[in-house]
Image (cartoon, coloured by chain):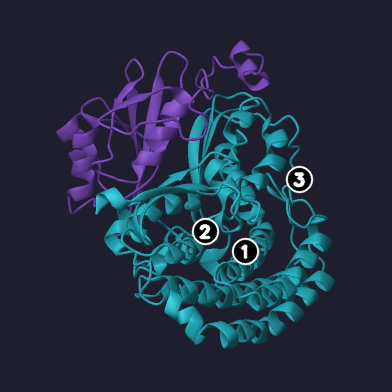
Amino acid sequence: MIDVSILKEKFNFNIADNKVIVESNIIDVLEYLKNTPEYKFDILTSVAAVDLKDKIELIYQLYSTGNNFTLNVSVIAENSFAKSVIDVYKSAYFDECEIYDMFGVKFEGNTNLKRLFMPESWIGHPMLKSYELKDERLVWNEK
Amino acid sequence: MKNSSVKINIGPQHPSTHGVLRLIAELDGEEILSIEPVVGYLHRGIEKMAESRSYLQYLPIVDRVDYLGGFFTSYAYCDAVEHLLNLEVPKRADYIRMLCMELNRIASHQLWLGTFMLDLGASSPLFYCFRDREEILSLFEELTGQRMMYNYFTFGGVRFDVTNEWLSKVSDFVSRMPKAINDYEKIITLNPIFTQRTVEKGILSPAIALQYSVTGPNLRASAVELDFRKNMPYAAYNDVDFVIAESNRCDSYGRYLVRIQEMKTSLDIIKQAVLYLKNDSSDYTLNINPVNIKVPEGEYTSYVESSRGLLSCYIKSDGSGKPYRVKWRTGSYYAVQVLPEIVKGLYYNDLIAIFGSLDVIMPEVDR
């Protein structure tokens, strides 16, 4: 197990079972977690977005090959805006495009942000809870 | 020089893109200046489907996330649900699951090897691989009733018990396989046409691989010993002995060697699993009723080493009968992303060979 209490002091985290909730700058946190020898989280395994109806939560799932430890870092995308982390982990590019496509979160700093799965002309963001099967925006398909 | 560059489109219906991948390539003569993968042609909305179905109704769909490795995706999903439900799966079920997953890994690698060689213009290895893969699929058919989408694992165990007769058939198969793998190696490993197109082609350095979150055999061929079966043991992997296949070549050839070695490793694990199952007669399921399952509030991520790298399934439950959010993380998704990085500056004909060596399949990328 990795001691996350140092992180708590440094970044003022809330910690709940293997998930740290970040309120400060996500880039600083990830850079710290990646480059500090005690942690060395060298793989960003994935970024999961969850629509909590009034806000969108982004969960950065990290893995450290040296320490064999996983850590979930959670951050809230305020008004569907978040900071891009592609400068820290390049693998985040597809994840960010997918989250933009599916949840409409815009990533500041990702200059090539575009829809990953849906066609460019698609209206709306399908993974949002407000987007239901009978949504009128789906007539796109009929045309 | 830039003025002479040409943009060409490859795919999406190109046979060697293993599904439907489109590549926008910028070429200067035959040299690749840049490449941009365009994905999404096989998007079926598997993550969205979860939110309108009960946990049980979603179970048959998860096989489709990676249709060549249905057991891995089933396992990842069942494992996450079981953790949320606080269920302890019986030892026998764990062994049966492990046995199925390892057979699946061999079948998946055989398909990869056959189609990879087809990409390189060799058609006979395909017949060798499919001859033996057929045996595995017949075994699966006998056990689960299906050749591809098994829907065999369930919450708290597996659907049917394995019989001793079936286990004997598996033993027979395992005893024949080393010779079959030897056959593959005889026609491929030292073949000069093969080595010329793979040795020192498509160099994926460890730093780049980690930066792009590449996992599985691709990462192990880049001298990083990361195997979630060993690092974070699940199912019964803690109880069996096996050696992680690894290579420090970092090239396409290394990725081939690692996968051949992995088939042998899988055979070792299967042997041990068969031995255990033959001498054991405990329960294979917890016999819970999965129909009206209510999963307590919480979230969990399961980590599984699939044949194409780390497969993880994140489930968030709000306490109701339907998952609030399911997120799949698959190996191919990140292997596609690293492709532009490793083909830059090479020739166009290397592109297909290198892409083939990464073992990308598109349903896993698009989900």
Confirm whether residue A127 shows in the render: yes
Q: Of callouts 3 and 2, which one flags the residue occurring earlier in the amino acid sequence?
A: 3
Q: Check disc 2 and report the residue beneath it.
A: B308
Chain of the residue under the numbered disc 3 shown in the image = B
Q: Residues within 10 Å of mark 2 (few under 14, many from 20)?
A: many
Labels 1 & 2 near each other (Cβ < 8 A): yes
Q: Position of residue B274 (x, y in %)?
A: 70, 73
Q: Which residue is mark 3?
A: B287
Of residue B99 and residue B109, the one placed in the foreground of this image is: B109
B130 horizontally vs B323: left or right: right
Q: Which image quadrant is residue A114 in?
A: top left
Kindly indicate which chain is depicted in cyan in the rendered structure.
B
Does label 1 or label 2 sit earlier along the sequence?
A: 1
Residue visible at 65% across and 63% down in the picture: B104
Secondary structure under the numbered disc 1 in the rendered image: helix
Q: Amino acid at mark 1?
A: Ser
| Helix, strand or loop under label 2 | loop
